[in-house]
């Protein structure tokens, strides 16, 4: 949709934001890398989630810590939405889900 691209471009110019995709190849690659990291980083908690729910045992896992992790994901999600930063929004929503799953498992099986 060329019209939508034009509106998006005008908004970026009006708000004095960098072009997307950026002209600098290094910055463009960094943007792409962060989109990948946004999905991979929260996936690192999958083994913990599987272990808790498969064994139905959360010994040694702190509900308080994972509750705080989940709670502090919320301001980051809001920040990402306000600043329209897709990697931040995606990553912290996924972190919120994974931290909440660990918290739930810990509360159920401790």
Image: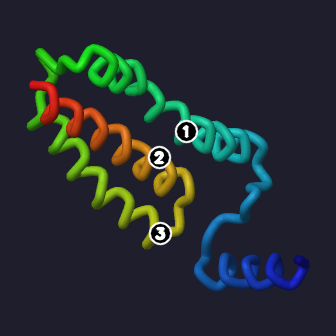
Few, some or many residues within 10 Å of mark 1 (<14, 14–19, 20+): some
Q: Nearer the viewer, mark 3 or mark 2?
A: 2
Q: Looking at this rendering, what residue extends furthest in the right direction? A: 2
In front: 17, or 32? 32
> Is residue 16 positioned above or below 67 on the image?
below
Dot 3: within a 10 Å radius of its alpha carbon, few (fewer than 14), some, or many (20 or more) residues?
few
Q: CA distance from mark 2 to mark 1?
A: 6 Å
Image location of residue 109, percent across then percent down = 15, 26
User: Can you tell which of label 1 and label 3 is closer to the viewer?
Assistant: 1
Q: Is residue 8 above or below residue 51?
A: below
Q: Nearer the viewer, residue 65 or 58?
A: 58
Image x and y of residue 29, in percent: 71, 40
| Circle 3 residue | 83
The earlier-in-sequence mark between 2 and 1 is 1
Q: Quadrant of the N terminus?
A: bottom right
Secondary structure beneath label 2: helix
């Amino acid at each position: 949709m060329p019209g939508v691209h034009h509106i998006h471009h005008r908004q970026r110019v009006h708000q004095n934001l960098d072009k997307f995709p950026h002209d600098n190849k290094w910055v463009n690659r960094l943007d792409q890398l962060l989109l990948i990291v946004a999905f991979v980083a929260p996936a690192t908690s999958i083994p913990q989630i599987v272990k808790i729910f498969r064994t139905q045992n959360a010994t040694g896992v702190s509900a308080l810590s994972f509750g705080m992790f989940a709670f502090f994901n919320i301001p980051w999600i809001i920040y990402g939405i306000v600043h329209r930063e897709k990697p931040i929004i995606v990553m912290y929503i996924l972190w919120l889900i994974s931290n909440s799953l660990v918290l739930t498992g810990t509360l159920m099986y401790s």
